[in-house]
């Protein structure tokens, strides 16, 4: 089979750590891979902005200790077999792939020995880092390696619109009696404004998270929940969407909607959270104080802000064990650009949406409930993170499941099966087209983001969630009409995906009356 624009062995949708790892393993085995990236620069995505690091086993560590820490952060909802596999095999992949093959420039001491960082709820120093831009170091090294492989074809500025399934798209009505299979995706080529079908024998969904469904987030603009929404529309099982993780320390500025992250590693080196009046408050909430799990710290900050009617709390770096300029140069520079010199002043911080612990349900090899569809990275729910993710385990999970999914595709040896691609029609444009109105798109997007933040945020009640559901369902109705009658553009696709993803979060949160991890529902207020 030729690796041309329309047909490939494996289609990987997304080029963060998880998608690139899957692509690399497949390509090195001689399989043709097409990697789709929504942006012109395939490196753009959450991976590029990761700061703190990637977890592995530290010098005085053990698999047992790391497993315990992941499970304790997950608050009883993590799936033990997945955690066990992550710890046993994932840490090996860091060594063989990231250190030995791709040669990520992790920070070392003057003798060239790797250094390990500390973050919340970790019982050991065990996090590999590259100053405070670990994600960039990993993404650039991986992207370089993958780009050099002749079996990989990057399709840049190409947005997956919907997965192609035998039961939804085939012109043969009898396909409805078979187990649904995914045969690729329809993709919008942004520069041409044209939608094409991309056929594949296996499809790997690696589209990252959903931060932009919330008003305040640490995530970049491409995190619109595209993958969750596409998988849901295709009929895949989705799980744990109520467990949306809020990072405790995003930079606060009254004129900034985008929140720059202040890494948990800063608290790992001794920074302390204080109220604006200078009181260290974390000991009131956890014996682990500032290094408690993220859900505990975020709720504590939120409560202190409510109690004191403050718009933010302060992160005091005056007793740091390292030189902040040297250890956290990116944070130092960005704070300075925003008027805060972290060598002299505390940093104003607030919690912001950071990560989705739930997602498209997959097994230990990344297989979803649909035939030929895999999901890896943040979009997937492996069960590792349960109700709350342990710091710096997301990059590891993306790496590991990207690797496992590729291994499963290779082992299945189904890449030469005869598949009914000929039954799939070309993309049909709607008969009547109305002009897109950017004002409507922007306003609807803002409404969804502020609704989720205010009604499905850090503290939830049934009443707030019901209100959110009613408001978002009303919007969905209008957005669906909009989607069917305007020329396809990335912004329209984004809006359609954000509204579907928002409803997945709200409906999961409404169904779950038990507060655990990052889902807190106040029962006495309904
Ligand atoms: P991403 O890296 O987000 O990549 C998703 C890709 O999918 C992108 O290429 C995007 O363009 C593409 N895409 C999306 N939709 C479509 C579509 N419809 N069609 C085509 N392409 C599409 N985790 C840690 O473990 N350690 C850390 O230190 C850490 N720090 C973080 C700091 C910040 C500021 C943020 C935001 C996150 C951090 N995380 C960290 C979380 C971690 O970075 C992410 O969970 C992880 O990188 C996700 O990787 P991924 O491969 O799943 O997705
Ligand atoms: C951070 O550096 O605080 C982010 C780490 C993570 O999201 O795991």
Image: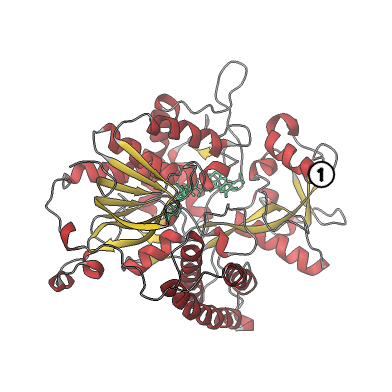
Image coordinates of residue 320 in percent, x first then y, are: 76, 36
Look at the picture and state if 485 lies above or below 304.
below
What residue is drawn where x is 63% and y is 36%? 132
Image coordinates of residue 168 in percent, x first then y, are: 25, 70
Q: In the current view of this chain or complex, which residue is farthest to the right?
A: 277
Of residues 369 and 164, the one nearer the viewer is 164
Q: Quadrant of residue 216?
A: bottom right
Residue 61 in sight here:
no
Tell whether circle 1 marks a residue whose Cβ is less than 8 angstroms from ligand 1.
Answer: no
Mark 1, residue position: 340
Look at the picture and state if 162 lies above or below 319.
below
Of residues 190 and 323, the one nearer the viewer is 190
Image quarter (top left, top right, bottom left or bottom right) of the C terminus: bottom right
Image coordinates of residue 501 in percent, x first then y, are: 47, 67
Image quarter (top left, top right, bottom left or bottom right) of the N terminus: top left
Q: Colour scheme used in the picture?
A: secondary structure
Q: In the current view of this chain or complex, which residue is farthest to the top?
A: 111
Look at the picture and state if 64 lies above or below 483.
above
* Circle 1 Cα neighbour tier, 10 Å, few/some/many (<14 / 14–19 / ≥20): some
Q: How many marks?
A: 1
Residue 395 in sight here:
yes
What residue is drawn where x is 44% and y is 30%? 144
Q: Is residue 345 left or right of residue 388?
A: right
Of residues 235 and 174, the one nearer the viewer is 174
What residue is drawn where x is 58% and y is 32%? 130
Q: Secondary structure at mark 1?
A: loop
What residue is drawn where x is 42% and y is 65%? 229
Q: Quadrant of residue 448?
A: bottom right
Image coordinates of residue 450 in percent, x first then y, are: 64, 70
């Amino acid at each position: 089979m030729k690796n041309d624009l329309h047909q490939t062995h494996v289609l990987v949708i997304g080029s963060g750590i998880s998608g690139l790892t899957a692509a690399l393993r497949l390509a090195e085995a001689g399989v043709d891979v097409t990697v789709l990236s929504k942006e012109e620069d395939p490196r753009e995505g959450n991976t590029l902005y990761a700061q703190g690091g990637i977890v592995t086993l530290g010098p005085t560590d053990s698999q047992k200790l790391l497993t315990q820490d992941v499970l304790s952060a997950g608050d009883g909802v993590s799936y033990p077999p997945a955690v066990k596999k992550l710890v046993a095999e994932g840490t090996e992949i860091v060594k063989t792939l990231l250190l030995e093959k791709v040669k990520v420039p992790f920070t070392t001491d003057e003798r060239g020995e790797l250094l390990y960082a500390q973050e919340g709820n970790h019982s050991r120093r065990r996090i590999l880092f590259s100053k405070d831009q670990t994600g960039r170091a990993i993404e650039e090294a991986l992207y370089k390696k993958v780009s050099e492989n002749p079996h990989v074809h990057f399709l840049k500025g190409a947005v997956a619109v919907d997965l192609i399934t035998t039961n939804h798209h085939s012109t043969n009505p009898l396909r409805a009696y078979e187990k649904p299979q995914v045969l690729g995706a329809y993709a919008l080529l942004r520069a041409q404004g044209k939608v094409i079908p991309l056929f594949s024998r296996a499809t790997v969904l690696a589209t990252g998270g959903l931060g932009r469904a919330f008003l305040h987030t640490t995530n970049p603009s491409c995190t619109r929940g595209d993958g969750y929404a596409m998988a849901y529309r295709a009929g895949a099982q989705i799980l744990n969407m109520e467990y949306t993780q809020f990072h405790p320390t995003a930079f606060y500025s009254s004129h900034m909607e985008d929140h720059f992250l202040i890494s948990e590693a800063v608290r790992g080196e001794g920074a302390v959270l204080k109220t604006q009046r200078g009181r260290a408050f974390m000991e009131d909430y956890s014996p682990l104080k500032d290094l408690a799990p993220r859900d505990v710290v975020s709720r504590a900050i939120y409560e202190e802000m409510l109690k004191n009617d403050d718009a933010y709390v302060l992160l005091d770096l005056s007793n740091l064990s390292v030189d902040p300029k040297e250890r956290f140069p990116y944070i130092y520079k960005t704070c300075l650009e925003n008027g805060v010199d972290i060598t002299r002043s505390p940093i104003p911080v607030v919690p912001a949406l950071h990560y989705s612990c739930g997602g498209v349900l997959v097994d230990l090899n990344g297989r979803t409930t649909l035939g030929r569809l895999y999901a890896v990275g943040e979009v997937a729910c492996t069960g590792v993170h349960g109700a709350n993710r342990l710091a710096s385990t997301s990059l590891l999970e993306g790496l590991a499941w990207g690797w496992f999914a590729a291994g499963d595709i290779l082992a299945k040896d189904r890449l030469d099966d005869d598949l009914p691609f000929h039954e799939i029609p070309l993309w049909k444009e709607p008969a009547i087209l109305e002009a897109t109105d950017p004002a409507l798109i922007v306003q609807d997007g803002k409404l969804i983001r502020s609704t989720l933040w205010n009604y499905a945020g850090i503290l939830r009640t049934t009443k707030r969630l019901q209100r959110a559901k009613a408001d978002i369902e009303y919007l969905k109705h209008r957005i669906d009409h909009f989607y069917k009658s305007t020329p396809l553009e990335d912004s329209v696709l984004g809006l359609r995906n954000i509204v579907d993803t928002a409803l997945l979060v709200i409906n999961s949160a409404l169904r779950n009356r038990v507060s655990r991890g990052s889902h807190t529902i106040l029962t006495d207020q309904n």
